[in-house]
Image (spheres, rainbow, N blue to C red):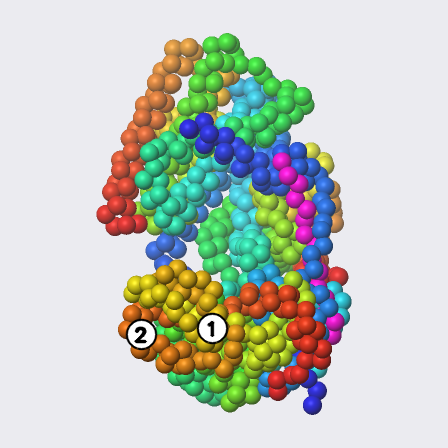
Amino acid sequence: MAGAIGFMIRLQIKTRVQYRVAFLLNRLAQIIAYASAFSAIWVLIHKFETLAGWRWPELALLLSFQLLGYGVGAALSFTQMRDLEDSVRSGRFDTLLVKPFSPWAYLVFSGLNLGYIGHIVLAVGMLVWSLSAVAIDWTVFRVSYALAALASSAALVCSMLTMIGACAFVLTRSRYLYSIFFGLWELTRYPLNLFPAPLQWLLLTALPMGFMNYVPVAYLLGKPIVVVGELGGVLAPLAGPLLVGLAVLQWRYCIRRYQGAGG
Amino acid sequence: MYGAVAQSAFQTQLAYRSQLWAHIFGQFIQVFFKIAIWQSVFGSLAQVDGVSLPQMITYAVLAGTVLSAWEWARLIQGIDVAISTGDIAVFLLKPLHYPLYLLASECGNLCFRVVAIVVPIVLTVALSYGLLPPASLLHGAAFLVFWALSFLIQFLLSLLFGLLAFWLMTAFSLEWLLQGLLALLSGSFVPLWFFPDSVTALVRHLPFAWIGFYPVAVYLGKLTPPQVFAYLALGVVWAAILGSGVLVLWRRATLRITVQGG
Amino acid sequence: MPPIIEASAVSKSFRQHKRFPGVLGALKSLFTQQFTEVMAVDGISFEIGRGEAVGYLGPNGAGKSTMIKMLTGILLPTSGSVCVLGRIPHAERSRNARQIGVVFGQRSQLWWDLPLVDSFELHRRIYKIPADRYRDNLARFSEVLALGPFLERPVRQLSLGQRMRAEVVMALLHDPQILFLDEPTIGLDVVAKDAVRRFLREVNRERGVTVILTTHDLQDIEQICPRLIVVNEAKLLFDGPLSLLRSALGSKRRLKLEFAADPGPVELPYAKLVSDAGALKHYLIEREDVSLVAVLSDLRDRADLKDLSLEEPSIEELIRSVYAGGDAQGRMSAAPPRGV
């Protein structure tokens, strides 16, 4: 299985290299777009100095966590799941069910989106800068925690997008659900203590995007965490794996229903 | 004839119902989190740089929802698709000019989104946080004119970028680029009053500023009547520049299609 | 010998969203959903032995693709059971998948932007084909279907015919026991169709691969499959050799004669005149033993004959007559012989 996956990644790279100029232009455009959006926040802080008690380097750390987790997680899910709806309708997905291979793995790796490199480059750049500008005493524990939280963040995004994608097996139209995801995802650019309590609860329970960046970064910075408080520190690296488990169950259920197996 | 095109666009939108609910939800989130941000940064301050919190709440709704109601990205995508499928050649043969057809179609789209999305949100915010009325009758009327200009400039910009895609072979990067420029420079989130002094002169004179910032600045009475007319004129100049850019590119595109056959 | 594929009273029904008309209807469907049941396969049973080549024939919407999906493990029957290679295909999906090959006529499994050989290489890794077996199969199949010049070309540059040949090759690289094909010759030009048919016939006869083929092109059946199963509107209508079907229904071939100018009445002893438009005359030949050669030799003295065509009844005509022919139907649905 690993051999086939490795080969699929190689094939993706080979495809992108063919269109390398367009690929680079697209990456540049995306980096500019995200940088502009982040600059708007910078302009705001430049005028008002803090946002909900967070200064710019701290916000930059928050943003970089969000973008990095998203970049990695979405590379393994977004375009593949978004196009799943069409694939199911056209019957193309059926060709995956007749291979002796995990349909999820084939779908994800054959469509691995290397386009997220732009996001990752920008996020890593911001991460490196903000880590040096922020007042954290870096111990081995804190470094490993940050890495675990980032991995969990990517897993979280991947799971959530996969769960939306799986809806394509049971609903005729499910693409609009992504708008809901991205609407809420944009909120995680800001510290959650900014928002009214119901929204905080939503982003830390039903749609636990708050664990992508707000909770681990607030923990690392020693800031109080809304809703989950002391538990936040522990929950952040666990949220990802937990959601992965949920996503696996839901994916299997949805495919069984698609096949008429009655779930 | 253009009226029929607009109406048809309106009805097509009605067909995509579930998408609509998601968009309404998304827009609600957008406006409420912006209001939350302004409330937070203003804190107990009565005003910052001569702007009060109630004014910023009104700003958030007008610039963030009303003036951003039209989905410019779909226009670029539509042109991209028309170019790659060759449909664009079909429009060349029609008696109506393609850009005008698009304008009529997008007007229909805008009307739909105003009715379906903007109205509910404006009402909700008005009833919960309260919205300020226009600073005066003149400012109110001028706002409507600026709104139309904002739509026109958005339309021309996305048409321009869409046509550029014809040569650059990539609509994707142009769409993202425009998105970035608008996020920062249109004033749909952070008003241009709050920008650093070093860039404010430049930013206030780019065409993007007429998309979000100036219409609301006019509405809130931040511009005196002479200034209103001055900036209206300047906005029209920008629209004319963009419009001629579009016509030039359009003619070149037409030429290239007829010579090369798409 | 146990059958390699066994379908017992298989049925499959789907739920479809009811659409409400008008604007009010559109608003209504924002809030409620209602369904109708659509029966795609209705109580169909058959057995297929190892090494057979069976055509699964029917007009569009007859439920052919649904049956293939159940045989390959994509869908589960609503009732009844399917047994392939001694297993329930859906239950042991992966193990079953290793021993079958599937070609979908209108859904490509090839990677669009990359050279054809890359898709094959991926296939090799997914099916864990031993390197030498892969090389041998690829070499042999590419030679038969003349894929050699295209192996290095990006799939997007290949014609539909070339792509379909490649798909068939790919489906056989791992030496499957059964090859399923869902409308493989749709949209292909005559040359490509011919190449694919010949190849499938060879694969079946010389390698003993069981071939199941859905189509609505009778020629596919005639060239490849001694046995055919006819379905229409979800039900099984006929299961047996094509010759039996023809003789059961009485083959009605259409003879079209086109003359340079109206030659007056033209009589043929074995053909019934259907329409006479002067220079263009249509006949119906009901006898099976009359061949095109016989007709030509009869008309060879006619210098004014411009064009001649002899057409087989189309599958639609056969199906229609299947419904119409009461007696014939009775004869067909009783214990049909298998063509092994």
Q: Amino acid at mark 2?
A: Arg
Residue nearest the observer in this picture, A227 or C79: C79
Q: Residue at x 38, y 18 (%)?
A: B232
Q: Could one spot residue A96 in this view of the protein? A: no
Q: Horizontal placement of A123 versus C178: left or right?
A: left
Q: Amino acid at mark 1?
A: Ala
Q: Is residue C7 magenta?
A: yes
Is mark 1 in CB contact (under 8 Å) with mark 2? no
Which disc, if any, is residue B198?
none
Q: Residue at x 59, y 30 (%)?
A: B116
Q: Disc 1 on helix, strand or loop?
A: strand
Q: Horizontal placement of C30 versus B86: left or right?
A: right
Q: Is the stretch drawn in magenta largely helix, strand or loop?
A: strand
User: Based on the displayed image, in which of its 4 quarters is residue B88 positioned?
Assistant: top left
Q: Which range is magenta?
A: C6-22
Q: Residue at x 64, y 65 (%)?
A: C324
| Percent position of residue C167, x then y | 47, 73
Few, some or many C-alpha atoms within 10 Å of disc 2 (few <14, some 14-19, many ≥20)? few
Q: Which residue is mark 2?
A: C302
| Percent position of residue A240, x then y | 66, 56
Pick the quarter of the image with the N terminus of chain B. top left
Which disc, if any, is residue C271?
1
Residue nearest the observer in this picture, B124 or B260: B260
Q: Residue at x 60, y 19 (%)?
A: B131
Residue nearest the observer in this picture, B127 or B21: B21
